[in-house]
Amino acid sequence: MIRTLTTLMTLVLALPGALGVQDDQRAELRERLAEVMRLHLESKDNQAAAPDDAPAEYEPQARAANLDEAALPTIKLVASRSASRPGEVVAIDVFLENVVDLRGYQVALEVTGGQAGRVDVHEIAIDTGREDYVFDSSPAVTATDSVGARLAVALFRDGVQVSGPNYLGTFQVRASADAKGRFSVTLRAGQDSMLRASDGEAIPFRAGPAAVVNVQAAQPTSKNGPALRKNERD
């Protein structure tokens, strides 16, 4: 079972050229690789910790310590709105800035905080038709995993320069019926979120601020309709 995006991208990036795939075969290969990527995202093995003998670049942020943090590529989360109510959906768009050579990425989110209930990832989409989509119209393999709150995309060949902000994907989050309070949506660190260059090397990056979703508790209702607020009763 494929354990890391590094191994997966070796397949995605190397096979078309190495096997001399013709244009009319690329669609079939793309479908097969998409299935491989889907299995990769769903695999429990993919969530395993890095092996003790892994090279330093196994952890994308490992090489960032000696770099100017302000010059690092940045992954940003932008919520469609900050206020929400139980049961409502909020879209979290993911953007990337400042990459010289990008050939693949994986983004995973986590939600923390709140006074009660929870906010969960409801659906994931990668709108490749957007004008600001990072890979534009270049052939790529995409995969999403709503249960694991992850998405991944890899180009078939070469890499792109990103000045940004350029769009990576969208996570839709939904508040549970009993949710209330301030929830923070952030990148999951480690191997769950990563950038890869055209040579397969990890690209150090930094995460922007959390996207905040403030869930207001549902108003209680009476038999005759919504309950009146105090100032309406006085």
Image: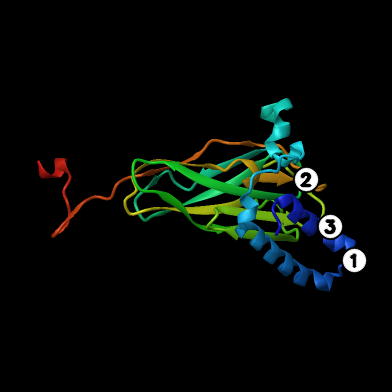
Q: Is residue 218 left or right of residue 138?
A: left
- Tell me what residue is drawn at x 13 percent, y 60 percent: 223
Residue kind at label 1, given as amino acid type = Gly
* Looking at the image, residue 14 lies above or below residue 75: below
Q: Is residue 32 left or right of residue 108?
A: right
Q: Could you say which quadrant of the image residue 61 lies in?
A: top right
- Tell me what residue is drawn at x 14 percent, y 44 percent: 232
- Tell me what residue is drawn at x 60 percent, y 40 percent: 189
Q: Position of residue 71 (x, y in %)?
A: 70, 30
The residue pinned by badge 1 equals 20
| Sooner in the amino-acid sequence: mark 2 or mark 3 | 3
Q: Position of residue 92 (x, y in %)?
A: 51, 49
- Of residues 66 and 24, the one drawn nearer to the viewer in this rendering: 66
Residue kind at label 3, given as amino acid type = Ala
Residue kind at label 2, given as amino acid type = Ala
Q: Could you say which quadrant of the image residue 10 lies in?
A: bottom right
- Of residues 54 and 117, the one drawn nearer to the viewer in this rendering: 54
| Sooner in the amino-acid sequence: mark 1 or mark 2 | 1
Quarter containing the N terminus: bottom right
* Looking at the image, residue 105 lies above or below residue 75: below
Q: Residue furthest left?
A: 234
Residue 14 circle label = 3
